[in-house]
């Protein structure tokens, strides 16, 4: 009996395909860090800008920093979940 599942793709044996899969993996891992940092920076910048516009000095900064942190963690979670499938 064959132990392979029909829904699982066979691993590539061509060296060019193996190299391409490795580059694709590195690209996905690099995007994880970038999406986390961008979410944090955007949240912080919006909070800082709203603090300057409204005069509520630390309130908006803290709220949007936390929202950016949550968004960054969410991005990492969903990207790694998709990557590990």
Image (cartoon, helix red, strand yellow):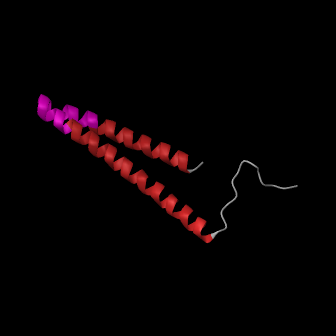
Q: Is residue 55 magenta?
A: yes
Q: Horizontal placement of 2 versus 10: left or right?
A: right
Rendered residue at 32%/47% (across/down): 38
24 relative to 46, above or below:
below
Main secondary structure found in the magenta portion: helix
Rendered residue at 33%/49% (across/down): 37
Q: Which residues are magenta?
A: 48-64
Q: Horizontal placement of 39 versus 27: left or right?
A: left
84 relative to 11, above or below:
above
Q: Position of residue 24 (x, y in %)?
A: 51, 59
Rendered residue at 76%/50% (across/down): 5
Rendered residue at 12%/35% (across/down): 52
Q: Is residue 4 magenta?
A: no
Q: Position of residue 79 (x, y in %)?
A: 48, 46
Q: Position of residue 23 (x, y in %)?
A: 50, 63
Q: Position of residue 47 (x, y in %)?
A: 22, 36
Check the picture and name the quadrant holding the N terminus.
bottom right
């Amino acid at each position: 009996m064959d132990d392979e599942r029909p829904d699982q793709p066979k691993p590539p044996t061509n060296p060019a395909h193996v190299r391409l899969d490795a580059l694709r993996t590195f690209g996905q891992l690099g995007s994880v860090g970038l999406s986390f940092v961008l979410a944090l920076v955007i949240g912080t910048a919006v909070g800082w800008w709203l603090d300057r516009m409204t005069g509520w000095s630390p309130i908006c900064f803290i709220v949007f920093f936390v929202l950016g942190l949550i968004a960054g963690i969410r991005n990492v979670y969903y990207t790694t979940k998709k990557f590990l499938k």
